[in-house]
Amino acid sequence: MNAWKRIALAALAFFGVGFAPIAVAAPLPMVTSATPASAYAGTTALDVVVTGSNFDRTARVQYLVTGTTDTGGIAVTKVVYRSASQLVTTIAVAGTADLSKFDIVVTLSDGRKGKGTTLFMVQAPPTYPANRAWHSFTSNGGSDVAASRLYMYGGAGSDAQAVPADLWYYGAYYDQWTLVSPASTAKPGRRQWEGLSCGAGACVMEAGSNGVGLVNETWVYGEATNAWTQAKCGRTSPCPAVRQMVTMAFDPQGGNHLLFGGRGSQSPGLNDTWTFDAATLKWTLRAPAFKPAERNRAAAIYVPGIGVVMHGGQDYYGRAPYCDMYVWNGSNWRQVQFDMNQPHPCLHTHSMARDGQGLVVTGGYVDTSDTPSAVLWRFTFAADAKSGVWSQASSGVCQPIIATDATIHPGAKMAYDNPTATRVWFGGEQNDTSGVIRYGNTVECH
């Protein structure tokens, strides 16, 4: 090889090395936020959306007490890759989890790692419900102390702010509220003016408002599974049209949940009748020969030997509260007769219960200016079960629990606990110069 060839090859080798591609390090994952950003200790199967960048399908996620390598009682049971900027993590928070802030660490299969600091927090679960009105409150019909629960969902807080999407139950024997932590990720959102009925191990929640608009959803809470299930609606499985302020009650004779009327987004009001089967998650539109007038904010309860009794409410335009009463016998409505010339209640937004002495109607408002009713009414059915007599009764002995005030406020809701023969009230509201005040006191009346 002559000198020129040696020089040419050397130069080629030099330039070949000089222009070889330089390896660029892959970017590290970045973790910027978590939604929701907190959970209560004891929460199971919670989906948390982790947002950031440079994720891939191999991502593993850890929640670590801030500044440590300690998981602090949070276990990640599942990671779903949505995109390079979003992961969905399913976590279980132990009841003994650290009440602390947590970092979120994302690690990829090639060892690249990113951390977002103080993005998540574990809090102690509340032991008492927040102040509210416009909530639902009803008994599950339990016949003994262990089984009896008074369930409450949703409502509006002060100045109409929506309260958390929470399900509580009250045990009258123990004078204790318990926040339900469902064992599933599926659950309804915030609701007010929703319908709720409970019985035979299930609570059915239908319709209502989320504080912004009406919600057209049906959810079923199973006591045995401690889980919510959403009913699916479609052409072959019709559901009630969107509405709020419906009237609902469990019908143990028919084994289903009854819904009547409500207020939709436009007039006229609604006077349709539906029944829901919690086992099949199916609604059935009924076709009774007789229908009560359209109404919303009525009250209803099942009375053995009579049927589901519905009373009061008001029409779409809120012109005046109704005084009438009807019975659903499983296939048709009929009006209950009483002497209109004798004192009787005309109410909306009230509560009904059946205690050891008969049918109780209490609370609510006597006019469309929302003047609260201060009377406890009783209705005694005649032997024919088609008519009866109204009478006023004493509220009995009432006392507050858990250091709350003893006033039964306007807009409070009542549910009856059968084993302890106790009427339980919660919440209510009052207009004030500074806005609307919502209450959170619990009052028991015997």
Image: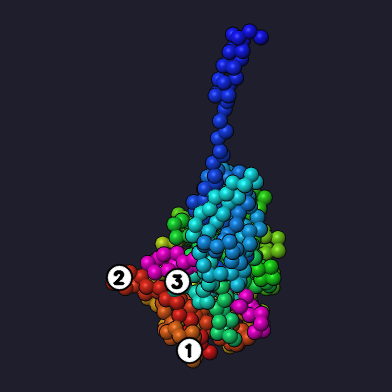
- Quadrant where the N terminus lies? top right
The numbered dot on residue 75 is: none
Residue type beneath disc 1? Cys
User: What's the distance in space between the residues labelled 2 and 3, CA to CA?
Assistant: 17 Å
Q: Earlier in the sequence, mark 2 or mark 1?
A: 1
Q: Nearer the viewer, residue 58 or 174?
A: 58
Contact? badges 2 and 1 (CB < 8 Å) = no
Q: Nearer the viewer, residue 242 or 325?
A: 242
Residue denoted by label 2: 434
Residue type beneath disc 3? Ala
User: What's the distance in space between the residues labelled 3 and 1, CA to CA?
Assistant: 20 Å
The reply, left or right, for residue 244 in relation to residue 57 is left
Contact? badges 2 and 3 (CB < 8 Å) = no
Task: Say whether residue 354 is visible.
Answer: no
SS for dot 1? strand
User: Total marks drawn?
Assistant: 3
User: What's the distance in space between the residues labelled 2 and 1, CA to CA?
Assistant: 30 Å
Residue denoted by label 1: 398
SS for dot 2? loop
Residue type beneath disc 2? Ser
The numbered dot on residue 133 is: 3
Q: Residue furthest left?
A: 433
- Per the image, is 222 magenta? no
In the rendered structure, which segment of residues is drawn in magenta? 140-164
Crowding at dot 2, Cα within 10 Å, few <14 / some 14-19 / many 20+, comes out as few
Contact? badges 3 and 1 (CB < 8 Å) = no
